[in-house]
Amino acid sequence: MAKAPERITVRKTYKLFIGGAFPRSESGRYTVARDDKGAPVANVCRASRKDLRDAVVAARKAQEGWAKRTAFNRGQILYRMAEMLESRSAVFEAALTAATGLSAKAAEGEVGAAVDRLVWYAGWADKFPQFMGTTNPVASAHFNFTFPEATGVVVAFASEGSALLGLVSAIAPVIVSGNSVVVVVSGPAPTVAMELAEVLATSDLPGGVVNILTGLRDELAPHAARHMDVDGILCVGADDATRKLIGVEAAESVKRVHFEDDGDLSHWHDEARQSPYLIVPFVELKTAWHPMGM
Amino acid sequence: MNIPTRELLFGDLWDYAPAPEARDHVRFEKRYGHFIDGRFVDAESWFEVIDPSNEEVLCEVGEASAKTVDKAVAAARKAQSGVWGKMPGRERAKYLYRIARIIQEKARELAILESMNGGKPIRESKSVDVPLAAAHFFYYAGWADKLRYAFAGADPRPIGVAGQIIPWNFPLLMAAWKIAPALAAGNTVVLKPAETTPLTAMKLAEIFMEAELPAGVVNLVNGFGKTGAAIVEHPDVDKIAFTGSTDVGKIIQRTLAGTRKRLTLELGGKGANIIFADAAIDQAVEGIVDGIYFNQGHVCCAGSRLLVEECVEDEVVEKLHHRIQTLRVGDPLDKNTDIGAINSRAQLEKIQELVDSGVEEGATIHQSKCALPDKGFFFRPTFFTGVSQTHRVAREEIFGPVLSVLTFRTPEEAIEKANNTAYGLSAGVWTDKGSKLFQVAGALRAGVIWGNSFNKFDPGSPFGGYKESGFGREGGWHGLLPYLEVR
């Protein structure tokens, strides 16, 4: 009979991240996350339609306050997220290796790139309005200007190819402008996403700005697309059938729908995966006319 | 002290002499088919186009089948890959400048045609629609050879063939809004004018020929919703731009689901016009009139919900009541006309139905007492008081000269009520206090906010909606984005 180890390790329970808290799925359902060899890594929640709805409520509640913060403050918080991720890089490297079988070097590269991507977007918070805003010369006595505002609540279906860098690349451009987001993680290594939730929970990010659900894309996509209090859908790596399903349902409330290609880690390392033009799909442009005269 | 408004009685005491714009100078054909690959082509079937002010037939136009649309798309594709997409921007620019200039040269003819076919007062066609249409071509002409400076870090490229569907409320202006940025960016176009107002689009085709615009760069197909659907569904169209109702916009968004086609939608609205007690009330009343009675209220960004601070409601309502008595409703070609003809019988019936619902739901109706012409489609300037937020006249887009008056007590309540709609296209804010104006403008969920003004437009000023009023912008630098591949 095998001898019990001297000390039994304490395993982590992986739950959902909604409104800054870590609840279990109300459905009581779970899936078994497995590594690249098929060995079980952990039990993770399989989020239900109700969990999605709860997350949208939390995201809605948080959104206005997040958008009203100064751009400088949002930038600082994104930068703080990068700090917290960097300080826990060993944890993420180990989690990526355990969950996906990445080599230590590749895992180190992914974590570093994820930190850098957060820093890159953090800097856009107070520059994007200048990048995307204009003063417009009009042929009348008006001061006329256009500036971007957050669309509102976005549901994002994150990369199924890169557990951390792909996830960060979906979250950062959406929240930097003042949106809140409900991220659905359906790829391998959902545990890594829940590790990231712990980073977010300790980064001064107001609860509800980012909510993370582990679950099945096909199950949750129609509910997200149909939800009347969701303003936008981002879907990374959607096939034509998923695009169609989301597009058809999203039309009922004229949602902003944006698709991005997915790929393996090298795809996400590419500099082309970070761009101010990736912030554009989830901003609204407001034009104001102010008369001039004495 | 509140001085009672003196009623202007001249409408009852003496008549204006008619002052019609002469139309002998205007030429148009008895029949227009479609404009495909640089020339007019015959149609398989035809329908009549009328003057809504007297119901007389102006001409016949063709109805494009899916087959005809296919020919137009093929011509556009050939022109895009063979000529227009390859042409240096500076050369594209010069064609657009030419078009702008010819529109200016023919401004009077175009204005008269616009009023004859659309029913809008000649005063507005002349001072708004036509000069703005020319200005749009002029504005975007200048972008054609400067695209590499437009979007930092990107290498913008044209998308390909754009399918565009436009409404009947600003026929020529909407064609310009759609065509000018598409062409400047190097795309080619298949555009469907509205079935009731194709005349100025056909004139625009003649202008393209006169400008020697290469064949196939712009193709115009006439027809109804079925023709529009054929454009939307065509597999070789890369981008759809639609201006029209939210209902049709949703159908288009559904239809494009699962395709890789790009889409911009400019849809309906139920714009709030907010009057604070500290506003210059007389100016605000003029702004209310501009907001809802401009172009018979056939304006997606109309200020159709008046939110007035409770303590000035009586004053504003009294002034507005007197003001609408002085609005002259009648012949669109008469230079003294303020409100022309409703665009179609169907639209007139829709307006009447919604007005009836307002009365039935318990709102108080106020209408001008003016006489209406015997023939044609006309509607008196109308407003409702005692409107609650649940009334249909406060929620649904009427697209006619009908205003709903609601009240508020605090700025927060005004913002809450203004945003309490599925739409988000426009809003107006009237106050003497700049800081309040900026604060409220920032809190409103709408794409265009007019401070102490309403219904102002400019080619340099982006236009488009939040929420169910659509997505994408037309006009200005931002108006290039929908027509370029930018990463």
Image: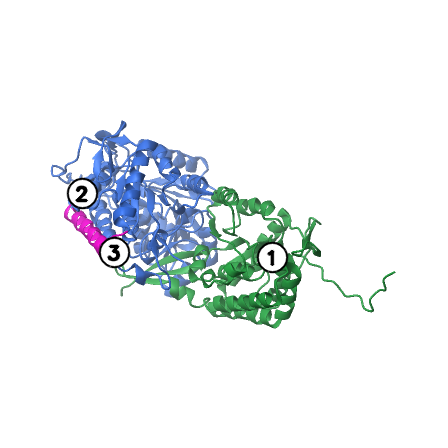
Chain colours: A green, B blue
* Chain letter behind tag 2: B
Q: Main secondary structure of the magenta part?
A: helix
Q: Classify mark 1: helix, strand or loop.
A: strand
Instruction: Determine if marks 3 and 2 fall on one subunit.
Output: yes
Q: Classify mark 2: helix, strand or loop.
A: helix
Instruction: Determine if marks 1 and 2 fall on one subunit.
Output: no
> In this picture, which residue range is highlighted in magenta?
B86-107
Q: B208 left or right of A281?
A: left
Instruction: Tell me the number on the disc at residue B209.
Output: 2
Name the image quarter holding residue B447: bottom left
Q: Nearer the viewer, mark 1 or mark 2?
A: 2
* Chain letter behind tag 3: B
For badge 1, the amino acid type reads Ile
Gap in Å between the C-alphas at discs 1 and 2?
57 Å
Q: Is residue B100 magenta?
A: yes
Q: Is residue B109 above or below residue A278?
A: above
Tag count: 3
Q: Nearer the viewer, residue A83 or B394?
A: A83
**Residue ID for mark 1:** A212
Name the image quarter holding residue B370: top left
**Residue ID for mark 3:** B89
